[in-house]
Image: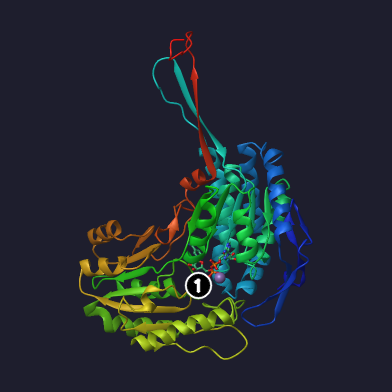
């Protein structure tokens, strides 16, 4: 494979990769090997200033003047460029994140489709006109909300960047995007491709850097009109506080502890392998990982043993091997955190059926782990572990299943496995989650709104309504009659 990683990556500001004013260039580690992967510049405050200024100039200039049809063409061209460069992007992402390349390829396909969806969705941006009576004419205008600051995490660096960039660009907003400092490579490459296909300088700016310093500075920046964030609930709350004083527009995609409900009438030949996939793809480092499996009691023991057998047989290893099903975690530090949860589960009385010990070696590997006999009140059932660890909890009946499913502070996703269609729809209406899958494990499709209830955040991505989060509605009211309106009769 060609190695695009021997490059040193600059910041992407005003249409080019540049050296950071901060002077900081960091070595990135390949999590699956522990070796150095590439060198990337980190942005400081002066760099964020430059990026915001470039975005402001783009909005006042070429990008602000780019008509909707041209924005659509550019979004399609970027989708084409992602597809044309998919081998390089896939290798960069797999090596930078440690994620299995088979998963990364599916994500890349979705990244391109997402740009295509918003390329078409541009056509839906329109105000309206409705009668207000008398001589008054009303019409509304949809205007870009302004310069957008976007912050994304390390678990899906490219896909999260595309989820964020595509609707903002479709709406006509320029963007300053801050990737996680550990995983900036694909967002930088994407921005470079965007420049090559014709996005004007300043429309897209990428400023990798640390969250509490560079990220917080971007959020507070007076030149930023709207913030869109994906990450932990704790950081989301902090960002919300920062946005409260200047009343900045904000959308938050946060954590999850999503349930996967298996009823005794389900087709287990579908339910069990899909439930295994729903937690272990991406090594469980997904906000919508179905990390709490709830099983109807008569099925419980049989389910746990069949699930655990499939889990322990997953192919864990080299992210670049096309047969690998699960790569490494993002870092050994994160692996220690995940393992700490497993130890806590043991202390709380959970049974470790498979996995539960870190893999020796330099890579940040952790095996697929099943915790059985878990009560929903235990920390392992309530806290986001963000690793390849599932809890399995029995339930008595439909009511009990709904109660346990909702007994958590998050509400991102739920999957229901049942042979009774009526039950599927009843659960869909009663589970408090942004997405409910019935006999179907997938969570995210371009065009289908994705986002959280409760502490999983607010605002939706991937949908048509996402555009509204990047637009202001301006109402224009005109007196078309011959008489002036003089309400005081002066
Ligand atoms: P995190 O909140 O620490 O970091 C996420 C991003 O925010 C990073 O870019 C980080 O640099 C930045 N950041 C950190 N502190 C900041 C601050 N004070 N101000 C501004 N930016 C700051 O999250 P993490 O633990 O690194 O990532 C995993 C988390 O992300 C998980 O909790 C997961 O559930 C969540 N996540 C949610 C979704 C979703 O769509 N809802 C998707 C992926 C990940
Ligand atoms: Mn973090």
Q: Which residue is mark 1?
A: 285
Q: Neighbour class for label 1 at 10 Å: few (<14), some, many (≥20)?
A: many
Residue 113 visible here? no
- Position of 289 with respect to 418 (left or right) is right
Residue at image location 52% in from the left, 43% down from the top: 121
- Mark 1, ligand 1, within 8 Å: the answer is yes
Of 308 and 339, nearer the camera is 339
Q: Is residue 481 above or below residue 213?
A: above
Tell me where residue 381 sits by quadrant.
bottom left
Q: Observer-nearest residue: 6 or 220?
A: 220
Q: Residue at x 59, y 77 (%)?
A: 319
Q: On the picture, is 456 further left or further right than 426?
A: right
Residue 72 visible within the image = yes
Q: Position of residue 275 (x, y in %)?
A: 38, 73
Q: Residue at x 47, y 84 (%)?
A: 340
Assign ligand 2 to one image quadrant. bottom right
- Give the quadrant of residue 296: bottom left
Label 1: element kind: loop
Q: How is the image coloured?
A: rainbow
- Vertical comparison of 108 with 481: above or below: below
Residue 324: image location, x then y, percent = 55, 78
- Identify the residue shown where x is 65% and y is 52%: 78
């Amino acid at each position: 494979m060609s190695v695009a990683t021997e490059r040193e990556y600059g910041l992407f500001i005003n249409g080019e990769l540049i050296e950071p004013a901060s002077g900081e260039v960091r070595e990135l580690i390949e999590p699956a090997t522990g070796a150095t992967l590439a060198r990337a510049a980190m942005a400081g405050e002066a760099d964020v200033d430059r990026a915001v200024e470039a975005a402001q100039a783009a909005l006042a200039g070429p990008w602000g003047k780019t008509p909707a049809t041209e924005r659509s063409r550019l979004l399609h061209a970027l989708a084409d460029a992602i597809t044309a460069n998919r081998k390089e992007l896939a290798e960069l992402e797999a090596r930078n994140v440690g994620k299995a390349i088979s998963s990364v390829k599916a994500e890349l396909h979705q990244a391109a489709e997402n740009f295509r969806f918003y390329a078409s969705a541009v056509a839906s941006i329109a105000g309206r006109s409705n009668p207000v009576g008398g001589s008054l004419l009303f019409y509304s205008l949809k205007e870009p909300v302004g310069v957008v600051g976007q912050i994304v995490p390390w678990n899906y660096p490219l896909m999260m960047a595309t989820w964020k960039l595509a609707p903002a660009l479709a709406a006509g907003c320029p963007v300053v995007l801050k990737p996680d400092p550990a995983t900036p490579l694909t967002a930088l490459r994407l921005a470079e491709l965007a420049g090559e296909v014709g996005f004007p300088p300043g429309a897209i700016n990428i400023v990798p850097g640390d969250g509490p310093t560079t990220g917080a500075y971007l959020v507070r920046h007076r030149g930023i009109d709207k913030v869109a964030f994906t990450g932990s609930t704790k950081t989301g709350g902090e960002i919300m506080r920062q946005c409260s004083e200047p009343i900045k527009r904000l959308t938050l995609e946060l954590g999850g502890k999503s349930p996967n409900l298996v009823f005794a009438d389900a087709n287990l030949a579908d339910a069990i392998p899909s439930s295994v996939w729903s937690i272990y793809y991406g090594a469980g480092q997904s906000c919508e990982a179905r990390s709490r499996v709830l099983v109807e009691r008569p099925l419980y023991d049989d389910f746990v043993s069949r699930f655990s057998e499939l889990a322990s047989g997953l192919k864990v290893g080299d992210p670049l091997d096309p047969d690998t099903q699960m790569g490494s975690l993002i870092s050994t530090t994160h692996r220690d955190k995940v393992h700490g949860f497993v130890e806590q589960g043991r202390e709380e009385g959970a049974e470790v059926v498979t996995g539960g010990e870190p893999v020796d070696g330099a890579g940040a590997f952790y095996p697929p782990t099943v915790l059985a006999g878990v009560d929903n009140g235990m920390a392992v059932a309530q806290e986001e572990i963000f690793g390849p660890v599932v809890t399995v909890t029995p339930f008595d009946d439909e009511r009990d299943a709904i109660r346990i499913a909702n007994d958590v502070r998050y509400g991102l996703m739920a999957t229901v496995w049942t042979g009774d269609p009526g039950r599927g729809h009843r659960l869909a209406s009663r589970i408090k989650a942004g997405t409910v899958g019935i006999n179907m494990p997938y969570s995210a499709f371009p065009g289908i709104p994705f986002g959280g209830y409760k502490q999983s955040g607010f605002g939706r991505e991937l949908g048509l309504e996402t555009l509204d989060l990047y637009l202001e509605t301006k109402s224009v009211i005109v007196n078309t009659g011959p008489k002036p309106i003089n309400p005081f009769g002066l």
